[in-house]
Amino acid sequence: MTAAGIDHAPAAAPAAGRRAPAAGARLVWLFLASRRTPAAAWLLAGLGMLMWASLHWHWNIAGGAAARQVIPLTIEAGSAAVIAVSTYGPFGEPERATGRWLPWLRMAAALLLTGAAFGALCAGATAGVLPGGSLALLRNVGGMTGTGLLAAAVLGGAFGWAGPIAYLLVTEVSLSGHPTTPWVWPARPPHDLGGALCASAVFAAGVSAIMLLGARETGRDSPGPLSRWIS
């Protein structure tokens, strides 16, 4: 037994250190791919194009101010539903083995897709005049996404679409009655502080719920309709 070559042993440490960032990036990519995040991003881009078409060809020109909000709100609710359904994983959450990283992966995916939704719809809004402008768009998308994330935490990721769709129905009924509550924030002016605070609170609650609790897994073996679109 000799000590020959012992001087070369420490050289393996830097190689292991270099592998750590690559392993972290691979973990993030696998998490996003398992939640069909790239497909969800393409769907959000499609909704941005739909927004562009609706404003360019004036699909919402008929009726009063409330009626002109229906199509943009429907598109915004659709983007929130896509984000909520993307929390659904067909194999549950095998990333639990990564320990402390899973909550941050959930949060990062939700924030990434929310930002992508806002960017895509903002790009689509350049085709015409969007009711309320970009401030109202940010408030509406954020708040509706929060309802979807809360629904995913309670009902399961496959059924996260129920939150934005239910809120859309309540909003459309309330718009015809001139509501004053800030909880129906799409009916408030874009600079209204109460509406912005309510939407922000719902978004924060949704992100916190999905980050700390994750999507409920009881419905993960029976995907809802939107989960099939982003499969």
Image: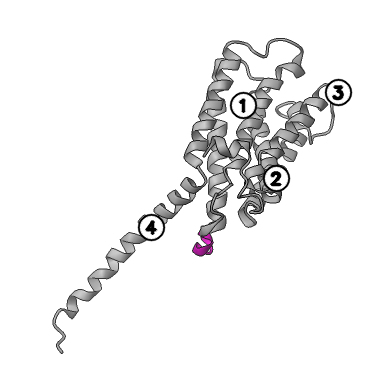
Q: Residue type at mark 3: give it.
A: Gly
**Disc 2: CA contacts within 10 A as few (<14), some (14-19) or many (>=20):** many
**Magenta segment range?**
95-101
Image check: 221 left or right of 194? left
Residue under label 4, please give it: 23
Q: Which residue is mark 1?
A: 134
Identity, as a three-letter code, of the amino acid under mark 2: Ala
What's the residue type where badge 4 is placed? Ala
Q: Given the image, on which type of amino acid does mark 1 rest?
A: Ser
Report how far apart the C-alphas of labels 2 and 3 lie in the structure. 26 Å
Task: Please name the colour scheme applied to the rendered image.
Answer: one colour
- Viewer can see residue 203: yes
Disc 3 versus disc 1: distance between alpha carbons? 24 Å
> Callout 3 environment at 10 Å: few (<14), some (14 to 19), or many (20+)?
few
Q: CA distance from mark 4 to mark 2?
A: 32 Å
Q: Magenta region's main secondary structure?
A: helix
Residue 105 point in image, percent of width and height: 52, 53
Please name the residue that numbered disc 2 is placed on: 151
Foreground: 51 or 90? Answer: 90
